[in-house]
């Protein structure tokens, strides 16, 4: 079965479980909480939970509460991200705060956050496993918040951050949920620290590779695929890896072209195209792909001791993530 088909199959199972948990009164609150969930998303993180459980011989049914909890937390972060960025669209539909208003959007995010822990608490896992899941998820949520603030501060400062500062930020903001997805899947199957940490490392490095590739798409992606204008991240002044590398390695005319549109909300389509063309001449895509591949290789090494179909399916996520088309 093709990777996308397998992810889609798992997504349907997760969606059904999520829908059963996101019901209640007042009805509008739950409609707001489920708004982004019903309108898109690959359910990549729940898929990682389920496969990480199966790779260690666990039953997928045991991982379902953790899989749905991680998706709730992911969507909680999306609701709040959209509020902070004042974004109007996501998944091709109005963002939660645009559709339901700011107060309800904040409450919807809070419900998603709280329900995630409720679902885990109500699971039929052992007491120790439940406590471990809650502890790991709470720590990941703290990391996401810290990473978000690092990203905000990075955006506010005139200084161009180093590559290591960028990696530290995405390790917290993005990779934390990939890390905990795999760790939670492992906890649903075993209490062995080595196995849990091996899966955790896989998720963390996969998450870094994912964000690096995502940032590349944000600069050079096809607008028909990304649903955003070409060079959108350049115009918004995002200090992502491809942009950092482009500013650092460009010279003369190319540097002026790139800096002219960087953080310039009034940049014209032609200016943006010229900047993206300049970045292409610098072969930034090739350099960024190499960086993503480095973390993908680290992720794969974490699973060397395992074998079987579920390992193959989990490892194939690396190709799916790193080789995503622009």
Image (cartoon, grey):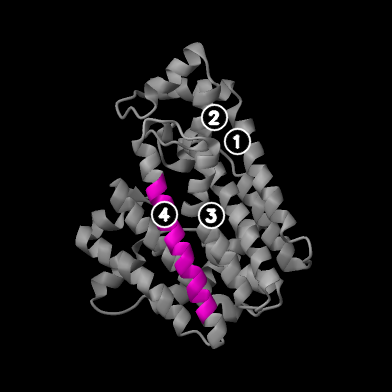
The answer for how far apart the CA atoms under marks 4 and 1 are is: 25 Å
Residue 201: which quarter of the image?
bottom right
The answer for how far apart the CA atoms under marks 4 and 2 are is: 24 Å
Q: Label 1's element?
A: helix
- Whether residue 241 sits left or right of residue 303 in the image: it is left
Q: Is residue 286 visible?
A: yes
Say whether disc 3 or disc 2 marks the residue closer to the N-terminus: 3
Q: Label 2's element?
A: helix
**Decide: marks 3, 2 in contact (CB < 8 A)?**
no
Residue 301's spot in the image, x, y percent?
74, 55
Mark in the foreground, 4 or 3:
4
Say whether disc 2 or disc 1 marks the residue closer to the N-terminus: 2
Say whether disc 3 or disc 1 marks the residue closer to the N-terminus: 3
Say whether disc 4 or disc 2 marks the residue closer to the N-terminus: 4
Marker disc for residue 245 = 2
Label 4 environment density (alpha carbons within 10 Å; few <14, some 14–19, many ≥20): some
Marker disc for residue 146 = 4
Residue at the (45%, 82%) spot, across then down? 121
Mark 1 highlights which residue? 288
Q: Label 4's element?
A: helix
The span picked out in magenta is 131-150
For the C terminus, which image quadrant?
Answer: top right
């Amino acid at each position: 079965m093709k990777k996308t088909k397998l992810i889609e199959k798992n997504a349907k199972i997760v969606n059904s479980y999520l829908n059963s948990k996101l019901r209640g009164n007042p009805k509008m609150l739950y409609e707001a909480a489920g708004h982004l969930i019903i309108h898109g998303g690959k359910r990549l993180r729940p898929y990682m939970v389920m496969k990480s459980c199966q790779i260690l011989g666990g039953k997928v049914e045991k991982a379902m509460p953790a899989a749905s909890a991680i998706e709730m937390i992911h969507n909680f972060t999306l609701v709040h991200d959209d509020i902070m960025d004042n974004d109007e669209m996501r998944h091709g539909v109005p963002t939660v705060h645009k559709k339901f208003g700011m107060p309800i959007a904040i409450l919807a995010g809070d419900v998603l956050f709280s329900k995630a822990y409720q679902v885990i608490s109500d699971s039929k896992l052992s007491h120790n496993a439940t406590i471990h899941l809650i502890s790991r998820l709470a720590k990941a949520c703290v990391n996401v918040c810290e990473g978000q603030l690092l990203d905000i501060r990075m955006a506010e400062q005139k200084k161009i951050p180093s590559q290591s500062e960028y990696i530290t930020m995405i390790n917290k903001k993005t990779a934390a949920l990939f890390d905990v997805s795999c760790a939670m899947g492992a906890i649903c199957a075993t209490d062995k620290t080595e196995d849990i940490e091996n899966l955790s490392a896989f998720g963390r490095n996969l998450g870094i590779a994912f964000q690096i590739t995502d940032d590349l798409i944000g600069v050079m992606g096809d607008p028909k695929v990304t649903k955003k204008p070409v060079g959108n991240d350049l115009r918004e002044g995002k200090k992502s890896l491809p942009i950092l590398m482009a500013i650092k390695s460009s010279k003369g005319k190319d540097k002026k072209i790139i800096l002219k549109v960087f953080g310039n909300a009034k940049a014209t389509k032609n200016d943006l195209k010229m900047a993206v063309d300049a970045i292409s001449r610098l072969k930034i895509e090739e350099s960024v792909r190499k960086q993503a591949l480095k973390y993908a290789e680290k992720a794969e090494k974490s699973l060397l001791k395992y074998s079987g179909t579920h390992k193959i399916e989990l490892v194939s996520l690396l190709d799916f993530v790193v080789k995503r088309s622009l």
